[in-house]
Image (cartoon, helix red, strand yellow):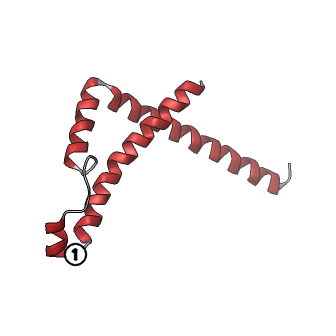
Amino acid sequence: MNPEEAVKENEEKLKREVLEEDKRLRQKYNVVFSSPQGKEVLEDLKDMFFFKRSTFVPSQVAEAGTTPMAYNEGQRMVIMHIEEMMRVAEEEEGES
């Protein structure tokens, strides 16, 4: 095997390892947040961090411009990330 082939093979191996680690992490999210306690915590996070309502709060914008809205949206994105990790994990389980 020449050096270029070895590098390419190593890159492909690393990519497979990263993909497998990502899959394991998604499974962990799903296990944690699919349990009864995890569902309760996720619902609380949704209530607290703008998942169920607009990130636009007129009084905040009037006082500080759009910075609070960006902050609120960042909080909301965390919940969206958790839900996406769980959704993909469930899809992957269905493919197995």
Which residue is more in the foreground, 77 or 53?
A: 53
- The crowding category of the residue bearing disc 1, from other C-alpha atoms within 10 Å (few below 14, some 14 to 19, many at least 20), is few
Identify the residue at horizontal 40%, vertical 32% (top origin): 30
Q: Where residue 13 sits: x, y (%)? A: 68, 44
* Residue beneath disc 1: 65
Q: Is residue 21 left or right of residue 63?
A: right
Examine the rendering and report whether any part of residue 24 can be seen. no
In the depicted structure, whether residue 62 falls above or below residue 17: below
Examine the rendering and report whether any part of residue 37 can be seen. yes
Q: Is residue 16 left or right of residue 41?
A: right
Identify the residue at horizontal 28%, vertical 54% (top origin): 75
Identify the residue at horizontal 26%, vertical 63% (top origin): 71
Q: Where residue 38 sits: x, y (%)? A: 28, 31
Which residue is more in the foreground, 55 or 32?
A: 55
Q: Where residue 26 sits: x, y (%)? A: 46, 37
Q: Where residue 31 sits: x, y (%)? A: 38, 28
